[in-house]
Amino acid sequence: MTYETVIGLEIHVQLSTRSKAFCGDDIRFGGAPNSQVSAISLGHPGTLPRLNAEQVKFAARLGLALGSTINLGHTFDRKNYFYADLPKGYQITQDARPICVGGSIEVLVGGETKTIRIHHVHMEEDAGKSQHDSADAYSYIDLNRAGTPLLEIVTEPDLRSAEEVDALMTAMRQLVRYLDISDGNMQEGSMRCDCNVSIRPQGATYLGNRCEIKNLNSMRYARKAIEYEVQRQIGVVEAGGKIDQQTLNFDPATGVTSPLRSKEDAHDYRYFPDPDIPPIQLTAAELAAIQAQLPALPWVLRKKMITTYGLSAYNAELLTAEAETAAFFLALSEQTAAYTAAANLIINKVLPWRKEQDKNLDSFPLSAAQLAELIELIETGQVSNSTAYQELFPALVAAPDRRPAELATANGWLQSADADELGSWVDAVLAAHPDKVKAYQQGKKGLLGFFMGEVMKRSKGQAEPKKTTALLQERLG
Ligand code: ADP
Ligand code: MG
């Protein structure tokens, strides 16, 4: 029997607001334990939450980008459970009426696009962090994270493999960064996901019982966890067993999932409207203002790069991976019509510069006009591609006030397409190798490369290759 894997994700994204969801505490990552905790974060009785309006804006931004329906009126609920890192005894979340419903996102899986439907997006606050693995006998609790604003994005069970999960997380990370609502950093826990995994016979249309693997904060672990869990479920079913609906933990050290608890039902949480937070009412005008401020979205830009600028799908993907890279290409495309050459220059030279320097592209020292001039030199054959990349580009970056043509001339990097000059190099080379000329004329056409090499040596790399080839072929008959 072959099985199909079915996966739905609950993705948690930490918002990059300045302060927490319901109080003014700083949300910055990495502070000394329990240094960002007011009485509200500590859950002291008698304190009252106050809504941070920025998170509502951020949530609406994401919903609009996903094409969700935005509930102008939405409410916060209490999800009641006991845990030491949740001092209030409940989490403030949205249950009955979340801010965003429906929508979808396009992901790229092995070069193909696939649409994943979104069930809904809701706002909620994060809990604190418990640490049980310290060397001494104690557990530690850090409440800095308690009350941090999160969005939970719940997908429909539309994913079919770990690879698609990876693609979705990549697309979501890209989107929240474009929207400037989160840094999307998985290592620091700003983005993590719960994976709901089930299997069914290939071709079946019903859903099998699922297990939920909690809190995966690295794509590598998510992949391993899903692969392990699918094999485990197939094993159970093949042995005639049934899958128990469970919440699982994944241990990266052993690569094994293990039950955390049996799956709780919604009624276990005793959800009810939070009486401390009045219903939120966005106006249509507020929503329109948020819509008007949406940046160009990654998949829109990707299509534009392919259709308007004629770039390959691969180049378009690389150039839209980050908003600033796409903006950089678009600025350059206003100065040159050689779009593919511009894309290649950015991908092969500018992006490696950014990585090496660990800087943003706004501190790249050359203007779009200078890069366009460099591209012009390549396109017209005045400077060879390799000289432009290996010599001229680094020289310009080191001396950004110089003009590309001027620097190329000063360093002797210009290629010659002058017929007389080319002719004298070609003649000299042919005269020096009469035996090879004979061999060529008797059919050893591969010697053309040898002659090219000799002309390049003699001209110190200044012979323009296309014209040189043509001239060699002409003289050799
Ligand atoms: P709950 O609120 O109990 O966690 P939901 O119905 O809201 O359950 O679903 C949560 C997530 O589980 C969603 O991402 C959904 O797509 C996914 N899911 C639901 N049923 C299945 C299934 N049979 N197999 C895989 N994923 C599923
Ligand atoms: Mg859930």
Image (tube, grey):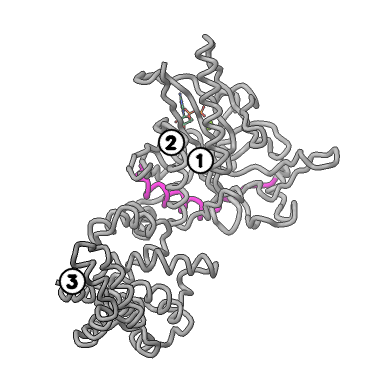
Residue 146 percent coordinates (x, y): 66, 46
Does mark 3's beta carbon lie closer than 8 Å to ligand 1?
Answer: no
Verify CB contact (< 8 Å) between mark 2 and mark 1.
yes
In the picture of the structure, the residue carrying the numbered disc 2 is 155
Q: Nearer the viewer, residue 413 or 248?
A: 413
In the picture of the structure, the residue carrying the numbered disc 1 is 11
Q: Residue at left 38%, top 76%?
A: 387
Q: Is residue 178 left or right of residue 17?
A: left
**Which comes before the other along the chain, label 2 or label 3?**
2
What span is colored magenta in the figure? 47-69
Residue 264 percent coordinates (x, y): 59, 24
Looking at the image, is 108 positioned above or below residue 205?
below
**Residue 473: numbered disc:** 3
Q: CA distance from mark 1 to mark 3?
A: 62 Å
Q: Secondary structure at mark 2?
A: strand
Does mark 1's beta carbon lie closer than 8 Å to ligand 1?
Answer: no
Looking at the image, is 24 positioned above or below residue 411?
above
- Viewport quadrant of the N terminus: top left
Q: Residue at left 68%, top 35%?
A: 89
Amino acid type at circle 2 is: Thr
Whether residue 53 appears in this view of the structure is no
Task: List the single residue furthest toward the right.
Answer: 136
Amino acid type at circle 1 is: Ile
- Disc 1 packing (10 Å; few <14; some 14–19; many ≥20): many
Does mark 2's beta carbon lie closer than 8 Å to ligand 1?
Answer: yes
Amino acid type at circle 3 is: Gln
Residue 327, quarter of picture: bottom left
Residue 374, quarter of picture: bottom left
Looking at the image, is 358 positioned above or below residue 388?
above
- Disc 3 packing (10 Å; few <14; some 14–19; many ≥20): few
